[in-house]
Image (cartoon, helix red, strand yellow):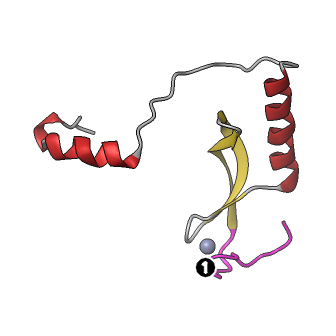
Amino acid sequence: MNEKRCYYCGTEEPWEDRTVEYLDSRKGAYLLVPDMPAKVCSKCGVIFYSGPALQGVEREFFAIQNGTILVDLHVDLPIADYASITAQNRNVTHDQLPVT
Ligand SMILES: [Zn+2]
């Protein structure tokens, strides 16, 4: 990335090199990359992924879907649509929410 200025907030504060969780989806399937390299704006937090990193994930995802390679780990992912979340929240009191 050659641009010094954040394309979202315009700050010229330095981008931070970090790893972030990246969720890719394709045809109803998902691939979570827990250690995706990224540059993060130190002011607003907008995330920038490099082209090679995105292309690498795309190749990996394609190979996984073709069965060419195996993933490191499979997990069950709870899914709830927004309507059911708001309906459930009406019946949950603060006492029932986990303490964080
Ligand atoms: Zn920014």
Please, what is the three-letter code of the amino acid marked with disc 1?
A: Cys
Judged from the image, the secondary structure of the residue bearing numbered disc 1 is loop
Quadrant of the image occupied by residue 6: bottom right
Q: Is mark 1 within 8 Å of ligand 1?
A: yes
Q: Residue at x 78, y 17 (%)?
A: 70
* Spot occupied by residue 41 in the image (x, y as percentages of width and height): 63, 66
Q: Is residue 34 left or right of residue 66?
A: left
68 is higher (above) or lower (below) than 12: above
Q: Is residue 67 left or right of residue 45?
A: right
Q: Quadrant of the C terminus?
A: top left
User: Badge 1: how crowded within 10 Å, few (<14), some, or many (20+)?
Assistant: few
Q: Residue at x 68, y 42 (%)?
A: 24
Give the main secondary structure, helix, strand or loop, of the magenta stretch. loop
Is 68 or 73 nearer to us in this picture?
68
Q: Is residue 4 magenta?
A: yes
Quadrant of the image occupied by residue 99: top left
Q: Residue at x 57, y 64 (%)?
A: 45
Would residue 32 be visible to someone looking at this image? no
Mark 1 = which residue? 9
Q: Is residue 12 magenta?
A: yes
* Spot occupied by residue 84 in the image (x, y as percentages of width and height): 32, 42
- Report the magenta residues as a range: 1-14
